[in-house]
Image (cartoon, rainbow, N blue to C red):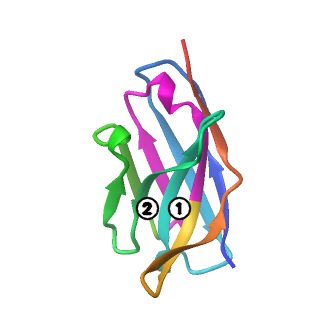
Amino acid sequence: QVQLVESGGGLVQPGGSLRLSCAASGSIFMIYNMGWYRQAPGKQRELVATITSDGSTNYVHSVKGRFTISRDNAKNTAYLQMNSLKPDDTAVYYCTAEKVVAGVRVVDAWGQGTLVTVSS
């Protein structure tokens, strides 16, 4: 069973940058697809970005060109680099470890979440 711990959240001004980290332990990190979700107050949780085990990435439209997901398999860590942050990006960010089973994405683990607040 994989365990995930996020870090890197905080308060940032609009237009600023943050890098979130997701450290994995307890299983073979490189076999997992990794994802970043977020949940803003009063809103549903949404998928922000994913990266497959071989490095293919995908993003929700609202963060394309601003956010970059990456992974370092040697460090068992996934990252979310967030640039040009907007107040609408304020949310708790969660990372996930996922597999595809019979064509269906299955989340094996969630991190505890890290709060990102974008405000002047």
Residue at the farthest top position: 120
Q: Secondary structure at mark 2?
A: strand
Q: Determine contact: label 1, label 2, CB under 8 Å.
A: yes
Please tell me which residue is depicted at 49% across the width and 41% down the height of the picture: 19
Q: Residues within 10 Å of mark 2 (few under 14, many from 20)?
A: many
Magenta segment boundaries in residue numbering: 74-95
Residue 4 in sight: yes
Q: Say what amino acid the circle numbered 1 marks.
A: Thr
User: What residue does disc 1 label?
Assistant: 77
Report the front residue among 21 and 42.
42
Residue 99 in magenta?
no
Residue 90 horizontal side relative to residue 14, left or right: right
Q: Position of residue 82 (x, y in %)?
A: 43, 38
Q: CA distance from mark 1 to mark 2?
A: 6 Å
Q: State how many labels appear.
A: 2
Residue 77 in magenta?
yes
